[in-house]
Image: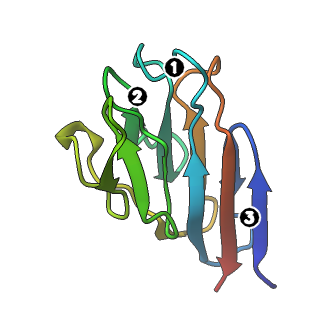
Amino acid sequence: MSATVHTGTGNFSYTNNTGGNVRFIVGVVMNSTTSGASQNNEAGVTMRFGPAGTPACFQSSNGTNQTFRGFGKHILYGSTGPTNQGLQIKNISGYSSWGTWVDEGWLAPNDTIEIHAKNNSYPIDFYNVVTIPE
């Protein structure tokens, strides 16, 4: 089987039903930057992967004086603060509550990866994920 590129808006979900292992690469995920979303801690992204029922393992959201814009293998720069000061996004650094995001991993048969908006009122603006059966 060949690789599949998944591109779109809103929530993303993929279940490995190939019978073998699947590698995934998250190229980019951008959360909503709707007016007001950055100030009320409601916009953001959650991610989980693994067997069904595995809890979300990563979550980040906007808050006062910060805007979480996205994560992925190819995001290298973002902005934060009232003066749009720059910060490094690859292996996200900045506010300690942001943690680190996984942008590549592997799914065993029947495992899933889900990338969802923290709040559906502020949907994901864009995602690009590739799945590669191995």
Crowding at dot 1, Cα within 10 Å, few <14 / some 14-19 / many 20+, comes out as many
For the residue pair 125 and 51, the one nearer the viewer reads as: 125
Q: How far is mark 2 from mark 3, CA to CA?
A: 34 Å
The type of residue carrying mark 3 is Asn
Q: Secondary structure at mark 1?
A: loop
**Contact flag, marks 2 and 3 (Cβ < 8 Å):** no
Would residue 64 appear left or right of 12 to someone viewing this image? left
The type of residue carrying mark 2 is Asn
Residue 9: image location, x then y, percent: 75, 42
The type of residue carrying mark 1 is Ala
Q: Earlier in the sequence, mark 1 or mark 3?
A: 3
Q: In the current view of this chain or complex, which residue is farthest to the front?
A: 83
Residue 57 in view (yes/no):
no
Residue lying at 50% horizontally and 37% vertically, measured from the top left:
45
**Contact flag, marks 1 and 2 (Cβ < 8 Å):** yes
Q: In the current view of this chain or complex, which residue is farthest to the left?
A: 96
Residue lying at 49% horizontally and 69% vertically, measured from the top left:
73
Residue 119: image location, x then y, percent: 56, 21
Residue 78 in view (yes/no):
yes
Provide the residue designation for mark 3.
17
Q: How far is mark 1 from mark 3, CA to CA?
A: 36 Å
For the residue pair 25 and 53, the one nearer the viewer reads as: 25
Provide the residue designation for mark 2.
62
The dot on residue 37 is: 1
Would residue 116 appear left or right of 69 to someone viewing this image? right
Residue lying at 32% horizontally and 62% vertically, measured from the top left:
91
Crowding at dot 2, Cα within 10 Å, few <14 / some 14-19 / many 20+, comes out as many
Residue 17: image location, x then y, percent: 74, 64
Q: Secondary structure at mark 3?
A: loop
Give the quarter of the image for residue 109.
bottom right
